[in-house]
Amino acid sequence: MLRLQRRRWRIRAFRKRRNLRAISNRTDQIRSSDILLFSTQRNEGVRLPYFLKYYREMGVDHFLIVDNDSTDGSLDYLARQPDVSVWTTRASYKRARFGVDWMNWLQMKYGHDHWCLTVDPDELFLYPFCDTRPIRALTDWLDASSIKSFGAMLLDMYPKGRIDAAPYSPGQDPLEIASWFDAGNYTISKNPRFGNLWIQGGPRARMFFTEEPARAPALNKVPLVKWNRRYAYVSSTHNLLPRGLNLVYDEWGGEKASGVLLHTKFLDTFSVKAEEELDRRQHYGGSKEYIAYAEGLKDNPDLWCKWSEKYINWRQLEILGLMSKGNWA
């Protein structure tokens, strides 16, 4: 049944390719050894300069981005970048399974046999030794270990005080403002169908889903994959098929290497973004997540609490058990 479902998602992605119109297709520059980054964005112009800088410095070779009808000039900005290929669409984000169909198509066409990192513009990928080793050191080790996928926990970052107190500027490191996180307050279960871990909790669960924590957003992701055109993401990057790619954890008491995605959603830009997405109703579950955000932030947009911890580096997260270097030394 899962093989049939994977085939269905791949066929669906092939059909959804008609939604996309190339604005600047530089994929002829991609070399066989290149590490690729895939993303969708809408009106993220303020974030894009730092986003591209961060991943270029990490060692990403080429960016493949779908712009979903932006109105803030970000499409033109992306089209001018020499290492970015960008497509645009006015089609429904929701009807493309929240962008997954577009990502699956581009990965089928351009990602085969490449290490592919799939992230949003508000996500900063961390992995063990990322302060001293480029991402190619990680992918080389994964290749040598015959590991085809690498998991990461989504860690919500936020300021101390009101999230609208400090203005965010283009090109600025968002962690200069959103530098705090919840060190605990997480639950983990196993998805019996796809075999992936299901992680929930953090500030979004305690602030916006206090009465219904089971409806809080999932924090488990598999963002880095040695792609094969037969693969397909199922639900964002929370899980994919074949299901063996979701086994990014050790079931026998040890630890597999894993990373963290620092989620910098909660800046002063968030309130406007939330209102826009609430009006568009293009997100999962009738945008119930954004309804919860609007209600929760109406009176006091402050996620900080006395148990919040200030981010230092990846080693801090390893000590807290939020990521692991496994047997990679």
Image: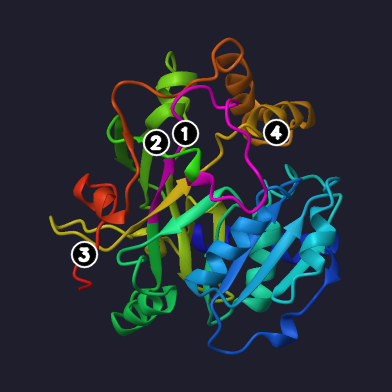
Residue 150, percent across and down?
38, 64
Q: CA distance from mark 3 to mark 1?
A: 28 Å
Specify the farthest residue to the top. 299
**Which residues lie in the magenta part?**
152-175
Q: Secondary structure at mark 3?
A: loop
Q: Of label 1 and label 2, which has the lower sequence position? A: 1
Query: Does the magenta run of residues contain 153?
Result: yes
- In the picture of the structure, the residue carrying the numbered disc 3 is 326
Query: Tags 1 and 4 in contact by the CB under 8 Å rule?
Result: no
Kind of residue indicated by mark 4: Lys
Which mark is drawn over residue 158?
A: 1
Q: Are marks 4 and 3 in contact (CB under 8 Å)?
A: no
Secondary structure of the residue carrying tag 2 is: strand
Q: CA distance from mark 4 to mark 2?
A: 21 Å
Of the residues tagged 3 and 1, which is closer to the observer? Answer: 1
- What's the mark number on residue 173? none
Q: Residues within 10 Å of mark 2 (few under 14, many from 20)?
A: many
Please tell me which of labels 3 and 1 falls first in the chain.
1
Q: Is residue 46 magenta?
A: no
Horizontal and vertical percent position of residue 187: 30, 34
Q: Residue 166: image x %, image y %?
A: 58, 31
Category of crowding for the residue at label 3, using alpha-carbon neighbours closer than 10 angstroms: few (below 14), some (14–19), many (at least 20):
some
The residue where tag 2 is placed is 180
